[in-house]
Amino acid sequence: MTAVPHPPPRPGPRQGPRPLALHMVLEGWILQMSFAGLMSSKSAWPLSSPLASPLQIPESLLSPLRALVAEAVKENPLHQNPQHQTQASPDARAWNSVLDPAAFIDAITRQAGARMETFVRGVRAYQAHPYRRSLAAPASVWRRGAAHLLDYAGPKNAPPVVFVPSLVNRAYILDLAEDRSLLRFSAASGLRTFLLDWGDPGDTERQFNLEDYIDGVLIPALEEIKHRTGQAPRVVGYCMGGTLAVAAAVLRPDLLSALALLAAPWDFHNGTEASRVLLEMSRPVLEVMLKAEGGASVDMLQGLFATLDPTLAGRKFRGFAGVDPASEHARRFVELEDWLNDGVPLAGPVAEEVLFGWYGRNAPAKGEWKVGDVGIDPGRIGCPALAFIPSQDRIVPPGSAAALAAAIPKAQAVNVDLGHIGMVAGTGAAAHVYAPLLAWLKNPPRP
């Protein structure tokens, strides 16, 4: 079969960051809420600092407010009170240095407008950037519905390894660029390397639940690799793909010779209290949307991810507004943002199981997750196991991934000072993840 770029380049301007309307609303809402926090401080503002407000304003709202205040103070340094400057803390001095409410409000308003304008400029610069992905994927050697196995080659008789990505993002995050490709590094290191690409849900996959994906796609793919190579493969699961790989290891231990997990979630209530509260509040709306759309759309999923860090898009695109579009930094930014915005919809039954079963009830960590009649107990995994736990991960909190490592007998846990995406596609990925992971895969310890 002929190799083609994955995905094909798309003509015209980009639509991201998705969902763009939500990001625009969040930017305005955060500034409004921050200003509301300033106005409702415990004493007549601006003589008291909202940092001491009994409202306990969240840090995510205070951060942009601090930036606005700092700029406002720079613009309007008049009427400073020397007594306050001497006795007050640095934060309080910043607040107390401006005693003209009208001028202060005007400065805050102008700074807020400037922040929004910079955000919009960054978005437009991203949308107009000339970069288009052209890296070709290898040929597909096996298909099952929308899913297929890509053969990244490597020595013919070398130990086989299959990489299993998440269902909710494109698999090519593991093959983002020539110099940011865990898959190409794997093949070059001497491993026979395969990628299971789940593809876009078709008419059949839209009815799938997790059992259908595990029993009907993942396990047959492992059987195919064992048949082709004569060896049970090592399996590397990234994010949700790692959780699915755990199920395969429990159900068919004969098909795995080793298991490596990259930021694989297990305890979905560890470090996610705010997200759980939001999910519970939003559940009636989410259920209606899932039924109406027949699943979770890309924009719906991206909107849920945005709630993990509402200020992230603003920070990123305000920063990008000042980047030289011809620079390597700009290309890398666009390369990754294109992947982030090129999502995959999630089948309705899968979305319900993940959102309400995993995140809602915490079924895996409670021992309640079953595939068919079999409970998925990591304690039954007998093959060598390695788990990478990124300390800066906001998508899979470190405690969630660490809980899975602790539940697998004799699993080795490796903490890395990286984020969820940075661990597979960041500048530190090759040294801190690729190299130790591939060394372990070539020579895993005996079970």
Image (spheres, rainbow, N blue to C red):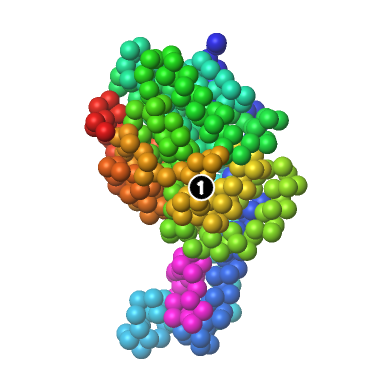
Q: Which residues are magenta?
A: 50-77
Residue 193: x and y in percent read: 39, 21
Residue 265 position in % (x across, y down): 44, 47
State whether residue 430 is above or below residue 288: above
Element at label 1: loop
* Viewer-nearest residue: 13 or 310: 310
Is residue 120 among the parts visible in the rendering? no
Toward the front, the furthest residue is: 373
Does the magenta segment cover residue 309?
no
Q: Place residue 89 in its image quadrant.
A: bottom left
Quadrant where the image shows the C terminus: top left
Residue beneath the point at 35% across and 24% down: 186
Q: Position of residue 32 (x, y in %)?
A: 60, 68
Q: What residue sits right under mark 1 in the picture?
A: 369
What type of secondary structure mainly makes up the magenta span? helix
- Could you tell me if residue 352 is visible in this image? yes
The N terminus: image quadrant: top right
Q: Amino acid at mark 1?
A: Trp
Tell me: 207 left or right of 332.
right
Residue at the outermost right position = 292
The residue at 33%/49% (across/down) is 406
396 lies above or below 63: above
Queried whether the magenta region covers residue 57, the answer comes back as yes
Tell me what residue is drawn at x 56 percent, y 47 percent. 354
Tell me the crowding category of disc 1: few under 14, some 14 to 19, or many 20 or more residues within 10 angstroms, Cα based.
many
In the displayed structure, 371 sits above or below 142; it is: below
